[in-house]
Image: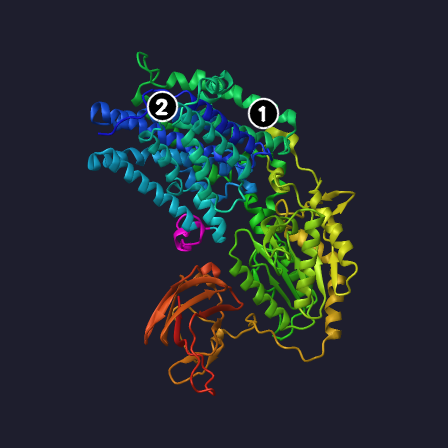
Amino acid sequence: MISMTKNSDYIEHIDFLRAISVIFVILFHLGNPLIPGGFLGVDVFFVISGFLITRNINKELLHTGKFNLKNFYIRRIRRLIPSLFLMFLFTFILGFLIFPPSLFTGLIESMFFSSFAASNFYFLSQTNYFDVSANLKPLLHTWSLAIEEQFYLFYPLTFLLLFKILKKAKYIIFALVTIFLLSLIFNFISSEGYISEKFIGYFISDPNFSDSLISLQFFFLPFRVFEFVIGGLLVFISFKGKILKNYLNLLGLVIIIISVFCFSSETEYMSTLNLFPCIGAALFICNEPNEFISKIYNLNIFKITGKISYTLYLFHWPIIVFYSFIYGFEFTVIENILLLLAMFLISYIVYNYFETPLRAYKNKPLLISNHGLISLILLCIIIISNIKTSVINSDGWVWRVDNKKIENLKLFEDPKKYQIKNWGAAGYEKYGFLGKLEKRNSIDMIWMGDSHAGHYSFGLDSIMVKKHKKKTFMSYKISTLHLPDIIHKRIDSTKTKSHLNSLIRLINSNPKTPVFISHFWNGEMASTKVKNSKTNSYENFKIDSTGYKELCEKIVQFSKILSKRDIIIIGENPFKSKHDLSYVDNLLVPKYFSNMNPQSYFTPSAHSFAINSYFRDYFNKFTNIHFINPSDVFCEDNMCIEQENGEIYFSDKDHLSKLGSLKVIKSIEKKLLKFINKSATNSTGNNINIVDIDTNNSSESNFIEPNQIINHNSKKLKFKNWYGPEAKHRWSCDNYSELIFNIKDKKKFKGTIEINHDVLGKQVVKILLNDSIIYNNNISGRNKKLTLYFTPKSLNNMTKNTLRFEYSNPMQPRNSKDRRVLALAFKNIIIN
């Protein structure tokens, strides 16, 4: 039999733990910089839940020999669901009154998934918990409640099964420890990258593997199981010695506090390191404090906060989101105090006059029967489902918006999709030529960077390509700083380095062609690390003059790699604070809040002016590095225009719309032509043609179609580092080889590649499609067929696609005249 180590039904000091945990979470959400790890309060709640649920199940099994699942689930429903649905009503009313269609639609969708404990999956597919967009999602915090409810669904059944099969406490402890270790190891090995993109793809479609992995670890129950199980194990653990228990209790509290102050969302291996606050919570729970410390723990402020902690957690985040939406996210001390008072007052009232009366107590008649309560909950879910359908079908209940505003937006067709359809790069490839020009070898301009390079695509195509017939290559495939000795915090460095090397090869194969570099400079600095030349370690950029200096030095270093040519740095365009709404979203705020009408001018982030000023002064001393400031087009006296005469220049808070893109390129048109003409004058006339294929002008016969068998001597492929063709195949002739091909419409492809090949010996072959790894494993044998899987979205229409093979053990032939490097012999390929 399992013996109980906790005799009391109610452990008072747990209320103190609940209180400080919810306070940490609230202060973190209020943006308090002193506690960057305040979100770990949720992890502590998971430990508490694991302990209390295991204790209750174990106690009932000891006393009765069985466990009533029906009563357990009824108690959980009465405890959690009524207050949750009341909070839904609160957020629905406020969202209806003030949210524009796009945000209101997201609110109703999240409410629907939250109503049946699946909001963690919804938010997993939508956002990273720490993303800027998360600040406008009033129900984002329900992810933790969803995980807890999923735990309540599966854990009692699992524990009962263990109890019936194993019977003895020591075996059950062993089983729980095994589950704990498996969950913890799962976290660690996934953080090391030993988890397939295909597995992640079942839950999230974000193309950024690292961001997707972080979200999966945060929102997915299997990565959180060890936290609950730590609590469950406490039921079978006891420490002897009153003094020792007093010290261990304080030690647990200290570990939690240190974790909250030292860890942050940027901490590596956070999904594993949150073990520390969980251990702290475990030590605190299972060890009683001494009499003096107990008096502190039992102060009324802590007891009340602990008792209302669930209700406080439910209401605090919607209050912050809606207040911030109306008044802005930068809170004063007075605002923080008023918000805290509002949260506590609302939660106290809900707990005492709504939540508590609905709960079941001994010798107290139920306010509503179990069947009545469940029926009411099901009715609410049906109502939410119908509202969701109505909101989606009527564009976010756009009828809430003033008709005059709707008239102004008719040209956008679907205002909710304005950003998608009207940003400067909409309709353009991330890597390839802009527009279509007659076939010729030379390139007039190369633009590279992130989406803040891409949003100039429309303007460049309209002015430079269509008007001046200048051949322009655009690359913004990967969002990072494409500079030496800089790595992204989340994107695999091998992927970014490979892409940077391919850009360098492209640029250097076009001597004298001017290169334009444009990034969201401040945003990318916050997302990357720079190599310290003294320590050879990578460190965070400082978003100040020190960091700007390091960035400029890397730009100069990069310019030296690109041989003698003009490098043009496109500065930071004006951007709004991360919490501000775009002009279009402001325009669509419902008529009930007329005081929120959008303004034509905005005050941009001070960082955009600061970095542009530094760039201008730093590059002024160079003859080949030039600076163009796009903010000059929009800003005067620290105020920037967002729209004029019905023309909206920004598609969101920091990206240019097509009209904004056109406005910038028109204003710098003469400068661009000057750089192009200068490069043409300096050219020797012996240009090395670009290595990459220009397929915009390829004949129809050079495009690969699905299910075609393309053999080793086909003209539909360009072969790099292959020897041949021989009679039946062509051999690799380096430690890597490439197949380069063109397609017209990637929508026709399903995502499989079949390669017929021979392999000499045994090779570990890494295969990449457009710099994305699709295979990394052993290959051996003759007359073999290898099937690969890829995402059709990764293909490029009307420009080159590269299938790259990298070999672990290429063998040089004995004959020195033989140019083959014997690794892989290619026969044919079918792309479908």
Q: Position of residue 465 (x, y in %)?
A: 66, 65
**Which amino acid type corresponds to the residue marked 2 in the rendered image?**
Arg
Q: Position of residue 736 (x, y in %)?
A: 48, 72
Quadrant (top left, top right, bottom left, bottom right) of the C terminus = bottom left
Left or right: 791 in relation to 595: left
Q: What residue do we see at 61% from left, 26% from top?
A: 336
Residue 606 vs 28, above or below: the answer is below
Q: What residue do we see at 50% from left, 31% from top?
A: 254
Is the image coloured rainbow, by chain, by secondary structure, or in one colour?
A: rainbow
Between 9 and 580, the residue placed more toward the observer is 9
**Which amino acid type corresponds to the residue marked 1 in the rendered image?**
Leu
Residue 771 vs 113, above or below: the answer is below
The residue to which callout 1 is attached is: 339
The residue to which callout 2 is attached is: 78
Q: What residue do we see at 47% from left, 76% from top?
A: 716
Q: Is residue 533 visible?
A: yes
Between 825 and 121, the residue placed more toward the observer is 825
Whether residue 196 is in magenta: the answer is: yes
Left or right: 301 in relation to 13: right
Left or right: 476 in relation to 826: right
Q: Which residues are magenta?
A: 191-205
Q: Position of residue 366 (x, y in %)?
A: 33, 15
